[in-house]
Amino acid sequence: MSFEENKALQTRLSLLDQSIDKLRVVFEQFFLGLERFEPVLLRKSIQIELRVLKENPPKNTAMKFLLSRMETKFRTYEQYWNR
């Protein structure tokens, strides 16, 4: 994997992490009644991005770890939101 590909993947993972954090905040607002609707589109886009990244896993061990950590974080939040 070239330096540019590695940097692009790192950026993509960083954006995914930010999206997961944003989704958590929006869900908290939804549960508090500040948001009227559940953030379905953002949740679906994160699920799609995780699926795409898992289908083509990174070769770099550190990137694999970050992806695994983000997937675990998202799944944990998802279990909480599905209750």
Image: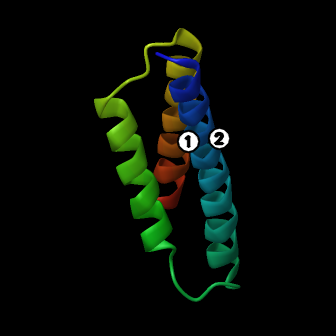
Residue 4 occupies quadrant: top right
Give SS at disc 2.
helix
Give SS at disc 1.
helix
Q: The residue under label 2 is which amino acid type? A: Ser
Q: Which of 32 and 75 is in front in this view?
A: 75
In the image, residue 47 lies at what x, y percent? Answer: 39, 51
The residue lying at 47 percent from left, 42 percent from top is: 75
The residue singled out by tag 2 in the image is: 14
In the image, residue 30 lies at what x, y percent? Answer: 62, 77
Residue 63 occupies quadrant: top right
Label 2 close to label 1 by CB (< 8 Å): yes
Q: Nearer the viewer, residue 68 or 9?
A: 9
Does the rendering let one see residue 21? yes
Q: Looking at the picture, does residue 72 appear above or below residue 43?
A: above
Query: Pointer 2: residues within 10 angstroms few (<14), some, or many (20+)?
Result: some
The residue lying at 55 percent from left, 24 percent from top is: 6
Question: Outermost residue, bottom direction?
Answer: 36
Does the rendering let one see residue 83? no
Q: Which mark is residue 12?
A: 1
The residue lying at 63 percent from left, 74 percent from top is: 31
In the image, residue 50 lies at what x, y percent? Answer: 41, 42
Q: Looking at the picture, does residue 29 appear above or below residue 6?
A: below
Q: Which of 81 and 10 is in front in this view?
A: 10
Q: Looking at the picture, does residue 22 appear above or below residue 12?
A: below
